[in-house]
Amino acid sequence: MSALDNELRGLGRSAVVPPVAQTLAAAVLERVAEPPVRRTFGEALRSRWRSLVALLAVLLVGALVTPPVRAAVAEWLDIGGVQAVRVPSGPTSAPTPPAVVGRLSVEEAARIAGFTPTALAALGEPTGVEASSGFVAMSWGGVRLEQFEAEPSPMYFKKYYTEIDYVASIDGYWFSTPHELVLVNKTGVEQTVRVAGPTLVWVRNGLTFRLEGVPEQDRAVELAR
């Protein structure tokens, strides 16, 4: 054994080693005690799928509550008993909506229609009231209000060619330009009734409302409330 070996052995016996081993052991034990982060392929796939479903749900909710999206959806979905159908072009003007000539009272109209109709309180007593089963029409001069029970198939088609506006305050839709109003009978046959002017359409308590003859959207919404 050389003199160098003896010196090294002596140095090793005399050296003071700091208590690192205990600290390192404690850290290792704490690490082992933690939940494992390694996942199987199936667990990773399920986690990724849940994230995707959550993202789709967020996007869907946003689409349902955003007015521009709602307006786009209304282009191909029924609005109660009215279905909006977009066409390439349409009329540029519309006559005043026809006046209701019947002289029923609101109570008589309710008995005939089978539901209690709603009048536009701000306009006072209607000048005309007509009714049939499931349908009531009223007018105040050039303002016409129709209300009817929504059926599985639409009663009216509105063939419009410009954008329609979603009105969040009443959950309705505003047709700002003239458009064809098509009546669909019980057998599904379409018949163009007339050209309608600006119209507000909304649904409340199972009834579909059409308010026509009010050219300003704000005023129509105010009456609808």
Image (cartoon, helix red, strand yellow):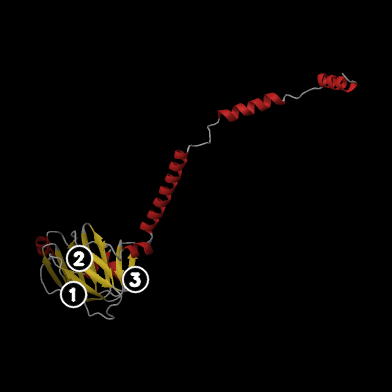
Number of numbered callouts drawn: 3
At x 21%, y 73%, the residue is: 181
Closest to the observer: 52 or 81? Answer: 52
- Secondary structure, mark 2, is loop
Question: Which residue of the protein is positioned furthest toward the front in this rendering?
Answer: 1
- Label 1 environment density (alpha carbons within 10 Å; few <14, some 14–19, many ≥20): some
- Of marks 3 and 2, the one in the foreground: 3
The quarter holding residue 202 reads: bottom left
At x 20%, y 72%, the residue is: 182
At x 63%, y 29%, the residue is: 27
Lower position in the chain sequence, tag 3 or tag 1 = 3
Q: CA distance from mark 3 to mark 2?
A: 28 Å
Can you give x and y, in whole percent of width and height, for residue 38 in the image? 52, 36
Q: CA distance from mark 3 to mark 1?
A: 21 Å
Q: Is residue 45 above or below residue 87?
A: above
Lower position in the chain sequence, tag 1 or tag 2 = 2
Q: Amino acid at mark 1?
A: Thr
Q: CA distance from mark 1 to mark 2?
A: 27 Å
- Label 3 environment density (alpha carbons within 10 Å; few <14, some 14–19, many ≥20): some
Q: Amino acid at mark 3?
A: Glu
- Label 2 environment density (alpha carbons within 10 Å; few <14, some 14–19, many ≥20): many
Q: Is residue 2 above or below residue 126?
A: above
Question: Mark 3 and 2 residues: CB-CB less than 8 Å, in contact?
Answer: no
Can you give x and y, in whole percent of width and height, for residue 72 in the image? 34, 65
Check disc 1 and report the residue beneath it: 192
- Secondary structure, mark 3, is loop
The quarter holding residue 110 reads: bottom left
Q: Which mark is residue 119?
A: 2
- In the picture, the quarter occupied by the C terminus is bottom left
Can you give x and y, in whole percent of width and height, for residue 82 in the image? 23, 65
Check disc 3 and report the residue beneath it: 163
Q: Amino acid at mark 2?
A: Ala
